[in-house]
Image (cartoon, rainbow, N blue to C red):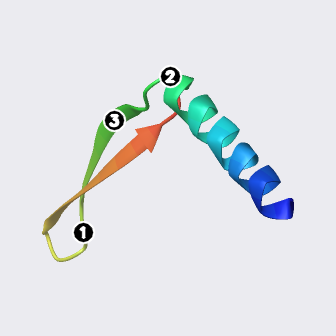
Amino acid sequence: MRLSRLLLLLLLNCQVNMTAPPKKKFREIWTGKDGVKHMRVNYHEG
C-alpha cells in the first residue's frame, strides 16, 4: 500500500513540474585575476 502512495506523490510532483513556468537563462561573464574570461550560465525561476 505504501508503494502506490509513493508513486502517486511522484506523479503529482511531475505534473507540478510540468506546469511550472520555464526558467530564465542568463549568462554571467567576468574576468579573473589572470585576465581569463569566465562564463557561467544561471537558471532562474520566472
Please state which amino acid type lies under the numbered disc 3.
Answer: Lys
Q: Position of residue 17 (x, y in %)?
A: 56, 35
For marks 1 and 2, the one nearer the N-term is 2
Say which of marks 3 and 1 sits in front. Answer: 3
Asked if 13 appears above or below 33 in the picture, the reply is: above
Q: Residues within 10 Å of mark 1 (few under 14, many from 20)?
A: few
Which of these two is toward me, 42 or 19?
19
Please state which amino acid type lies under the numbered disc 1.
Answer: Gly
For marks 3 and 1, the one nearer the N-term is 3
Tell me the residue at 17%/77% (across/down): 34
In what element is the residue under mark 1?
loop
In the rendered image, which residue does mark 3 sit on?
25
In the rendered image, which residue does mark 1 sit on?
32
Asked if 10 appears above or below 20 in the picture, the reply is: below
In the rendered image, which residue does mark 2 sit on?
21
In what element is the residue under mark 2?
loop
Give the distance between the C-alpha atoms of the residues marked 1 and 2, in whole angstroms: 34 Å
Tell me the residue at 54%/23% (across/down): 19
- Decide: marks 3, 1 in contact (CB < 8 A)? no
Q: Quadrant of the N terminus?
A: bottom right
Q: Is residue 46 visible?
A: no
Say which of marks 3 and 2 sits in front. Answer: 2
- Decide: marks 1, 2 in contact (CB < 8 A)? no
